[in-house]
Amino acid sequence: MWYKSGGLSLFSGSKVVLGENTLWADKNNGVSAGSMLLIFADCGIKIYEIASVMSDTELMLSSEYSGCTANGVHYAIPVFGSNDTFDHAAYVAQIAAMLAGYQSQLTQWKQVLTERGQVTLTDNSGQSVVVKTLPDLTDAVSRMMDKTLNGADIPDKAQFVANLGLSDVVHKSDLANHTHTASQITDFTDAVRKVLVATLAAGQGVSLNYDTTNNQLVVSATGSNSGGGNSDGGNSSGGRDYTVVTQSITAVTSPVVFRINNQTTYAYDAYALKEEVGSKTQVQLDDFGTNSASSYSATGDVIFDGALRSYANETLNTTQDGAFYSTPIRSAGKDVSFDLITDSLVSGLTSATSMPGVTVSQSSSAKGAEVVWQGWYAFDNNQQTIWSSEAPLPQWLSVSFSDLKTLTFYSISPSRFGGGVSPRSWKIQGSNDGGVTWTDVDARTGISWGSSTQTFRLAAAVQFKAYRFYCTAVNGQTDNTVAIADWVLFNDAKKFLLLADDGSYYTAANGTLTQVAAPTSAADITATGFASSGKITEATLAGKKLVKLVSDFPASCRVVYTSYPQIAIQKLVTTANSWSSLVSVVPTYTQSGSGNIRVAVSRNGNDWSVWNGSAWTSIGALTADTASAAKLLSSGTSLSSIAAITAAQWALLYSNNSGIPDAISFAFAIDMPIAATDVANIDNLSLTITASAWKLQTPAEVEIRWYRDQVTFKPASTGNYKFAYQHP
């Protein structure tokens, strides 16, 4: 019997063999202790004896497996022949072992296996053959394996070879004067096939059918006879299990024939099913949201936030942390830099008091046709709106805060109505008493304007609760009012310190870290901190880990972080038992610059494969570390290539399962060498699949005929069929 469903997992130096999608313990499949196991591995064929069947998915060999550890290996139980040098004695021994495997089904073999002399065997058709018993045959084999005899104990060597049907094989071997592997002998397969067909007979629960089109001997399990089953002499067909054979019909010229035990009642049932390939359906595999993180084994800088990406660029905002402000940071990559984001003290107003803690006032406001150009329009982030005074100069615009605000520079944008009303001379003033007294902090004269915004830096940073723009002259000869589109106040005097995992504080400049005393007040951070760190490398950190960014005031920081190659591996495989085919993989992603994403797939989560353009190749195991990330980046499949793989090419991944998907999982490697500009994100991963159904065929679609010794099926059209019949 041949059994080759599923695949093997083999372990070098171990007697244990594990199966995937196998049913070894099912006695109907005929796998038992003493059977031969043919393994197609390591670019060759290896033969082992099965010592015991432990379960449906575990075998114990009689000797340790000598090949390489591997998964998804093809096999067959039992087999005849190997790629080793052809040996007459080994051939006879294998025939004897194979015949012994049927002793539980063929009672006539009891004499062959236990007695000496010759035994006459009779098959179902009444033909007889005389064979030597197994003990005599074993003695002969032992003598033939004795190197000192060199076949001297065989009286008629030529007749011996002729009896085996291998005269032509031996003749060719003698001519070459050297040994051949089985694959080199052109008629070896034919000779073996003849021996198998002539010697095998179906026992209880087994059906044999020789497929002349494909030159294959089909061995089918018919199932056991249930308690309500009837013998051939009964009148009911109930109670017997079915033999079901799946076959692809490419031509309808002749029926498919299955041999059965001789019967005369015709009290048995048969039917046929034809595959109906389902329509394409797209299923989402992952949206890479925050909940997806627990489904992956990943390196430390992999981010799941609606996209799978490597941590790189981020804007951090410090929040209240005791007397200071802080935010957690990363520093396990190649390098990192921190830069203060300068923000305005007030912006985006929709009224004079729309921002909490802020109030805008003005000396006067001009009345337009439809609007009064009030002061808050200078803080609405819209250069199409303006503040315009109505009364003669001098005129002022002020903004007050609920607490002290630091000012280091400001910008002014001119009115869109022309340069005549643009300010030429003014002062910037500060007040801490509600506007009773004002202190000059900046003064400008003779300023001319085009259409662009101009920026003005104070000589030193100042702190007040209110600031005023006090205009004394404009650029027009006759104009006596002032108008501006925007007045933006900035503070870039905020400073940062870095807290390391050893409790020490550091300032930074041009990528160099300098330890400073732990701050006791915001003033300490202002005095010793930095606004721009420069690129801090892993070598500069020298084993230190930066854990927190600390600021003197609430601040925003631009972080640029270069990570090492990252990898994310799905922990579980997605089962595909209901799919008939995997049509395509549909990734949604963004890549730019030198950003790089590579992919591998697996059927078991252990052995990973990549598509090389023409075939699937194994890259072995992957783990969540930098080495595996580098391996996958080097040999993995790009996202564009994954998206282009056809259904036929996906079927090659499941070649040992007739091209039908059983499971799939994904691993992703990400690299962003230039963190400031590179992009490499996967936003979504979907699969396009089909799911088939099997339709019961009518007599017009498949003609079924019963004979005394066979049942035939003749489909009217080509396709994939399942032929089922009860066995007498």
Image: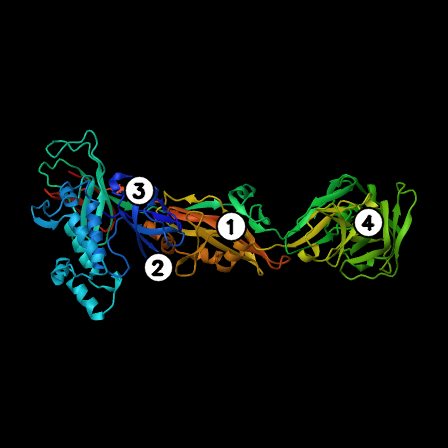
Which numbered mark, 4 or 3, is in the foreground of this view?
Answer: 3
Quadrant of the rendered image containing residue 165 = bottom left
425 or 63, nearer to the observer: 63
Crowding at label 1, few (<14), some or many (≥20) Cα neighbours within 10 Å? some
| Residue underneath mark 2 | 43
Decide which of tag 3 and tag 1 comes sooner along the chain: 3
Crowding at label 4, few (<14), some or many (≥20) Cα neighbours within 10 Å? some
| Residue underneath mark 4 | 526
Secondary structure at numbered mark 1: loop
Q: Please, which colouring scheme is shown?
A: rainbow
Residue that appears at 16% across and 33% down: 237
| Residue underneath mark 3 | 52
Residue 369 visible here: no
Q: Measure how far apart labels 2 and 1 are at the Cα level.
A: 27 Å
| Residue underneath mark 1 | 623
Q: What residue type is labelled 2?
A: Cys
Decide which of tag 2 and tag 1 comes sooner along the chain: 2
Secondary structure at numbered mark 3: strand
Decide which of tag 4 and tag 2 comes sooner along the chain: 2
Which numbered mark, 4 or 2, is in the foreground of this view?
Answer: 2
Which numbered mark, 2 or 1, is in the foreground of this view?
Answer: 2
Q: Measure how far apart labels 3 and 1 are at the Cα level.
A: 34 Å
279 or 237, nearer to the observer: 237
Relative to 123, 288 lies left or right:
right
Q: What residue type is labelled 1?
A: Thr
Residue 420 visible here: yes
Which numbered mark, 3 or 1, is in the foreground of this view?
Answer: 3
